[in-house]
Amino acid sequence: MKTELLEFENKHKLLEPTSTERVATLEAISEYTENFLGNIDTLPAFVNNVSEKAPFIQSINFEEQNTLNEVLKNIRLYIDTPGINPASGGHLGYIPGGGLFYGAVGDYLACITNRYAGVRFASPGAVLLEETVLNWMANLFGYSKNYGGTLTSGGSIANLTAIATARDAINLKAKDYHKAVIYTTQYAHHCLQKSIRILGMDDVQWREIECNNLYQMNVEELEKAINKDLNNGFLPWLLVASAGTTDVGAIDPLQQLSEISKKYNLWFHVDAAYGGFFILTNKGKQLLKGIEQADSIVADPHKGLFIPYGLGAVLIKNKKLLHKTHQYLANYMQDASTEKVDLSPADLSPELSRHFRALRLWLPLKIHGEKPFENYLNEKMQLATYCYQQLSNLPDVEVFNKPELSVFAFRFLHKELPLDKYNEKIQKAVMNDGRVFISSTRLNNCYVLRIAILSFRTHLSTIETALTVLDKSKKIAEDELYQELRNN
Ligand SMILES: Cc1ncc(COP(=O)(O)O)c(C=O)c1O
């Protein structure tokens, strides 16, 4: 038996590279990432040649061993080339991602030491660090010490966590779901509807309140809807405001909405996944006034703080309520549950074992300090204004909103061509060009283009390139559409 066990041990050493191998691996990785980052300004923001066949990465045969060089070559070819390049400043679509270097380094450290960030006694330091970054956020958003929070993989799970907490806050049970009412707008992010479905709450009443011409919730319409629901025996439950809609970056009137939520005893949730961290800027502080009144706030560091994908955050004003939804008891966790006074992340989130996410945020903050984040966010808002001005000066452009934060929508006009098709073709032509990437949405029943500026690598030269690419794409779209019309 002992011999057999020693044999196992020797074989399993294969999973533990030697120090020399580790150093050589890090050198190769460093060469790879340096090549990537060193060329990031010239790498395309979008590459259209989606290859159906990527044998190396599709193979489910893991019998063979491969060299790191071979692996990296294939990662470059099949993973880091096709599609959107979220690390590029030219990514101006959807909500652009970040990718701060020290965020990646934080992950590397977290993964090597593999600290267990779920339970305080298992890794008191990791838990403290999570609390530190959450405290920093709570302070930014004007929350008091009684708040509770958790770091999530992103905005969708953060919103889900908040909605589950809001449900339990009033002990809402399945038999009453059909009476409970959610108030939001058509511009709320789709993850909220997804959350409701995942929570098994499809039966709740969903009211999309009309917006004003700035795409913000109309407060009078909201109050009317609440009163109507009360008169009809419904239970007004949850008010979901957006602080930066995905479509146009609009911020609902938070202050007024908070007053309504108090008046009618609604849970006031603010989805600030995109817009939240603009609170670091003076303009953002003004725009987000009232957010401190929210019962729950979602803000995504992997958006507004430029952290690599995989970091959202939810803050709940009353920690006890976050705990109420996520508390647990299990015999095999008895060692961990001796200290319920100082709650652990696992007591406040759906997760038990979890990635030590705090390090990927704390490290960049600690190394760069807070100021560069503020400067970059100011830059993004000004770039959006500049780009908006340049486009709105063009005679053939219709703009749909002046950027409140750093997103706006517009479309090109044409005397003869169908506008939806024309703009769709422009978007495709921009993708084919690849120097920048922009996405589209629908507003007022029109297909519109969007520019969303949030990458820390987007600067004035990127916007100038975007304007050039749009101009070129317009001509391509026009030629193609005329050609199609001739052919039909
Ligand atoms: C306003 C808003 N809320 C929520 C989300 C969902 O966040 P995530 O993609 O991190 O799950 C997004 C994503 O873009 C968003 O813009």
Image: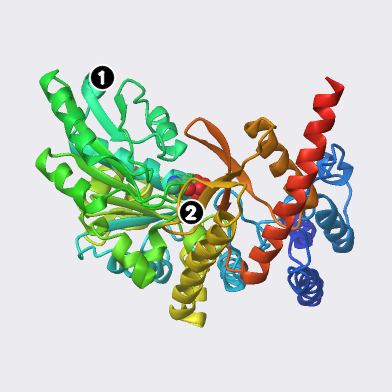
Q: Position of residue 392 (x, y in %)?
A: 55, 54
Q: Where is residue 401 in the image (x, y as percent from the top left)?
A: 46, 49
Q: Does the residue labelled 1 lie within 8 Å of ligand 1?
A: no
Foreground: disc 2 or disc 1 = 1
Tag 2's secondary structure?
loop
Is residue 166 at all visible to an observer of this figure?
A: yes
Residue pictured at 44% horizontal, 51% vertical: 249
**Closer to the camera, 240 or 6?**
240
428 lies left or right of 204: right
Q: In which quarter of the image is the C terminus?
A: top right
For disc 1, the neighbor class at 10 Å (few under 14, some 14 to 19, many from 20) is some
Q: What residue type is labelled 1?
A: His
103 over 321 or under it: above or below? below
Question: Disc 2 versus disc 1: distance between alpha carbons?
Answer: 34 Å
Q: What residue type is labelled 2?
A: Arg
226 over 466 or under it: above or below? above
Residue pictured at 86% horizontal, 23% vertical: 487
For disc 2, the neighbor class at 10 Å (few under 14, some 14 to 19, many from 20) is some
Q: Where is residue 325 in the image (x, y as percent from the top left)?
A: 28, 42
197 lies left or right of 184: right
Q: Name the residue under label 2.
A: 354
For residue 178, which numbered disc appears in the image? 1
For residue 68, which numbered disc appears in the image? none
